[in-house]
Image (cartoon, rainbow, N blue to C red):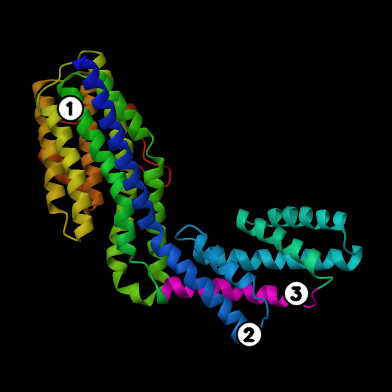
Amino acid sequence: MDVDSARIAGAVAELRNRGRATLRDRFHRLRSVAMLAVQAGLAAALAWLAAHELLGNPEPVFAPISAVGTLAASVGQRLRRTVELIVGVAIGVFIGDVLIYFLGTGPWQLALVVILAILISTFLGGSAAVVIQAAATAVLIATLSPSTENLEIPRFVDAFVGGGIALLVTAVLLPLNPLRVINRAARPALDLLAEQLDRVAEGIRDRNRDLCQRALDRLRSNHEELAAFTEAIEGAKETITISPARWHRRGELAHYADAAAPIDRAMRNSGTLIRRAVTMIEDEEPLPDPLPDAIGHLAESVRLLRHEFATGAEPQDSRECSLRAVSEAGRAYTQGVGFSGSVVVAQVRTTASDLLVASGLEQEEANRLIRASFGEQESPAPPAEQHPPPRRTPPPPLP
């Protein structure tokens, strides 16, 4: 009976914790979109007022729609979205007017208008937004032109007004703090990396192959975190470009932008490290005590890097922790490791080099510090075991 009661109590506690976590996630999502919601509401109201009061459009429906559509685009793509709105309107108006002039209006004409709008905008290389906008505009022209005169010009004007107002709101009236956006987006990616490295360090100490495998599986599913980080950097670049109030942040933003690629490489090289750690345990290779310590220092370096980025401090502590990881890896290699263990040692060096570059050091300086911290030994990993970096960046030299 006591055992059953304990199980029930444990299940209830787990459900309660899950409920709290879900509630926290919901509030976190609300905080992340609160500013966007305010920007969209303000942009819609101002676009309607501008089109109605200043330009005399009695029914400026498309102006607020354009404003909200621009803001609904991914952060970092709003300038592009505004251009896409206008290009899509132009294609739709042209196709709708030509077909109505020659074929008249009706159900089959409407179907033909939509088909041609999609095919022509796609042939011209338009994005999904351009294609959708062209088709929607062609539908409006084909259905409303017979009863509404001079629909085309207001449609163009509304596209300009809505997109322009949206950019005005994001650039001048309610500009986001680009560094805060990046910090918020970088936290999940860096926390994920640190947590999985901690798990691998624990798994190596306990010779727990399954724990290392779970860490590998979780790290492989990091696409969402990396995508959010990359998108936040692009959004910050856009904000810095169009918002005079944020121009003084350009130097700090450049540092973040430079850190994105080495952080991505650190993720990938850590995946190779963890995969070989699983094999090392399966093959019952020697596991010197300094090896899990080295990986634990890597995890701490990632946490320190995240903290120093968030506070704007020089990432000196993170650099020192990365070099301690390399030093411990050198001790492990001296004490003796097997083939997979040598790959793990090499990946500690490579990942530490990535983190040093992310902290702001040049690659050559990072390599020099890595070699000095490791000692006289050469990295034992064969080239085939090195995880290649993403295609958009050249492979860094092995420190």
Q: Earlier in the sequence, mark 3 or mark 1?
A: 3
Q: Are marks 2 and 1 in contact (CB under 8 Å)?
A: no
**Alpha carbon distance from label 2 to label 1:** 67 Å
Residue, disc 2: 55
**Mark nearer the viewer, 3 or 1:** 3
- Amino acid residing under circle 2: Leu
**Alpha carbon distance from label 3 to label 1:** 68 Å
Can residue 387 be seen from the camera position used here? Answer: no
Main SS of the magenta part reads: helix
Which region of the structure is painted magenta? 148-172
Find residue 151 and name its label. 3
Q: Earlier in the sequence, mark 2 or mark 1?
A: 2
Q: Looking at the image, which residue is at 86% across and 55% down?
A: 107
Rendering coords of residue 7 (x, y %): 25, 21
Q: Quadrant of residue 127?
A: bottom right
324 vs 154, left or right, is left
Q: Secondary structure at mark 1?
A: helix
